[in-house]
């Protein structure tokens, strides 16, 4: 064996790929999927100028982790949540995703057990067609609410939660749900507190008949996490370290309240003026219940 090959084998034989990169001081590359219609993927803005809450939070976590990591976007036809699970397991196209949790996802993937929206995901307000605004204002009980159908995305864990609690659910692709609501294919489109105002600001142009009901809400504990591949546990630890630091120093809460994606809800919808109806999420793991108790703003 040539002398160079012997040296190389001694240095790297049996060492994981990520450890080899760290040994030679190469920055870690963390790949995240990006939807091809996004401004960045269309070439209209730089990656540095791209702003989405989960991406900016991940950038913050990587920076605070102390690890030399670079976040790299992978443009693709954005897969459904069900499709993202096996793709992340394989870890051949991207390294981390974010979505709502359930026991199966936590078994197949590695969750970072810090809810990235600090527990405000399970607080659900409703978009509805303006023709339903007056009847909806008469809702008093969960049984009243169960008489109305709800739209949800394909593969979202919320589908199971709502069905378990006696609701009629109509599924569709995320990018079409607001238009389906406008066409009255279902009655209510429940969205997380942190996202509903920002989403409505762009959805109303494609679905002018929809409005936000700001007085009545539904709550069930449902955190959204960053997930990584089981093949990459060190990345899970890096993201967890950064998020814990961002939570402890207040930077995570500040980002949530001020980011352009989430700030509209915090400024336009008064949490203290909501009539909140609660239902159970039987799919929540014990680990997630502990995470909600530790990090949630609303429970």
Image (spheres, rainbow, N blue to C red):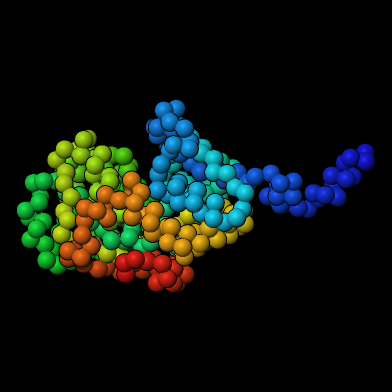
Q: Position of residue 197 (x, y in %)?
A: 24, 48
Quarter of the rendering containing residue 209: top left
- Which quadrant of the figure contains the C terminus? bottom left
Left or right of residue 66, residue 282 in this image: left
Residue 218 seen = yes
Quarter of the rendering containing residue 257: bottom left
- Which quadrant of the figure contains the N terminus? top right
Q: In percent of the image, x 43 and y 38: which residue is there?
A: 50
Q: In percent of the image, x 17 and y 41: which residue is there?
A: 182
Say if 280 sits above or below 43 in the image. Answer: below
Of the pair 134 and 269, the residue shown nearer to us: 269
Q: Position of residue 7 (x, y in %)?
A: 88, 45
Q: In percent of the image, x 40 and y 48: which residue is there?
A: 53
Q: Position of residue 225 (x, y in %)?
A: 45, 57
Q: In percent of the image, x 74 and y 46: which residue is there?
A: 24
Quarter of the rendering containing residue 173: top left
- How many discs appear? 0
Left or right of residue 19, residue 1 in this image: right
Residue 168 seen = no
Say if 6 sits above or below 119 in the image. Answer: above
Left or right of residue 139, residue 178 in this image: right
Of the pair 87 and 26, the residue shown nearer to us: 26
Q: Position of residue 289 (x, y in %)?
A: 41, 70
Left or right of residue 43, residue 162 in this image: left
Say if 111 sits above or below 180 in the image. Answer: below
């Amino acid at each position: 064996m040539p002398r160079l090959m012997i040296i190389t084998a001694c240095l790297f034989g049996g060492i994981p790929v990520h450890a080899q990169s760290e040994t030679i001081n190469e920055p870690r590359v963390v790949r995240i999927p990006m939807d091809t219609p996004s401004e960045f993927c269309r070439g209209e803005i730089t990656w540095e100028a791209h702003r989405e809450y989960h991406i900016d939070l991940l950038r913050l976590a990587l920076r605070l982790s102390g690890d030399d990591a670079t976040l790299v976007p992978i443009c693709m036809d954005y897969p459904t949540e069900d499709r993202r699970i096996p793709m992340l397991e394989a870890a051949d196209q991207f390294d981390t995703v974010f979505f709502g949790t359930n026991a199966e996802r936590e078994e197949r993937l590695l969750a970072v057990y810090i809810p990235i929206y600090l527990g405000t995901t399970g607080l659900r307000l409703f978009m509805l067609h303006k023709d339903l605004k007056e009847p909806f204002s008469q809702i008093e009980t969960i049984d009243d609410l169960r008489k109305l159908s709800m739209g949800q995305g394909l593969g979202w864990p919320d589908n199971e939660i709502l069905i378990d609690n006696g609701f009629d659910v109509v599924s569709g692709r995320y990018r079409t749900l607001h238009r389906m609501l406008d066409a009255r294919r279902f009655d209510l489109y429940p969205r997380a507190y942190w996202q509903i105002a920002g989403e409505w600001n762009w959805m109303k142009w494609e679905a002018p008949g929809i409005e936000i009901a700001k007085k009545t809400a539904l709550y069930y504990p449902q955190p959204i996490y960053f997930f990584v591949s089981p093949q990459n546990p060190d990345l899970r630890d890096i993201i967890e370290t950064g998020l814990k630091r961002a939570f402890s120093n207040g930077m995570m809460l500040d980002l949530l309240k001020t980011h352009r994606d989430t700030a509209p809800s915090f400024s336009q919808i008064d949490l203290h003026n909501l009539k909140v109806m609660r239902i159970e999420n039987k799919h929540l793991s014990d680990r997630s219940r502990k995470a909600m108790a530790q990090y949630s703003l609303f429970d």
